[in-house]
Amino acid sequence: MKTTTSTHIILFCKICKGNLSSIAELSSKVMDMKKTIDDRLIAMEKVVSTRQLSPLQEEEIIQESVDRTLRIGNILLANVPEVKDVLDEKVANDILELIEPAAVESLENVSYR
């Protein structure tokens, strides 16, 4: 229950407005949730502090990071009709020209993977 500067106005939350005895129930629920969160936090901290990666797992993480770095500049085009006797790079540059002219690459800088 919260009172305002006026002694005639008292504000209640929607649940409390109907039944003041529900405040104790709400308080109990909040304390239960707090305990659950605290218990889960302790369990997570324990897992994080004791978890060790194998050399193979570390290598996989490093390789994934390298792969993502290499793919960061990739452009994927979907549902673009194939044009006979026109290079894919030319089609991609034509699309880029419409979107962002500064993104157009010379065909010498384009590579296939």
Image (tube, helix red, strand yellow):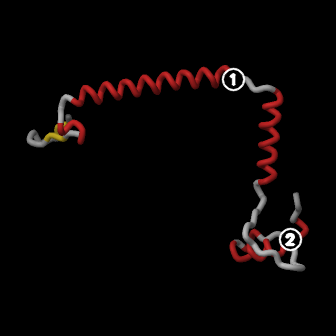
Q: Residue at x 35, y 28 (%)?
A: 30
Reading the image, the residue beneath label 1 is 51
The residue at which mark 2 appears reads as 106
Q: Residue at x 81, y 47 (%)?
A: 67
- In the picture, measured across the screen, residue 48 lies left or right of residue 1, that is right
Q: Residue at x 21, y 36 (%)?
A: 16
- Secondary structure of the residue carrying tag 1 is loop
Residue 48: quarter of image = top right
Q: Quadrant of the C terminus?
A: bottom right
**Between 36 and 107, which is closer to the camera in this rendering?**
36
Quadrant housing the N terminus: top left
Q: CA distance from mark 1 to mark 2?
A: 48 Å
Q: Secondary structure at mark 2?
A: loop
Question: Which comes before the other along the chain, label 1 or label 2?
Answer: 1
- Could you say where residue 20 lies in the image, as x and y percent from the top left? 18, 32
Residue 59, position in %: x, y? 82, 34
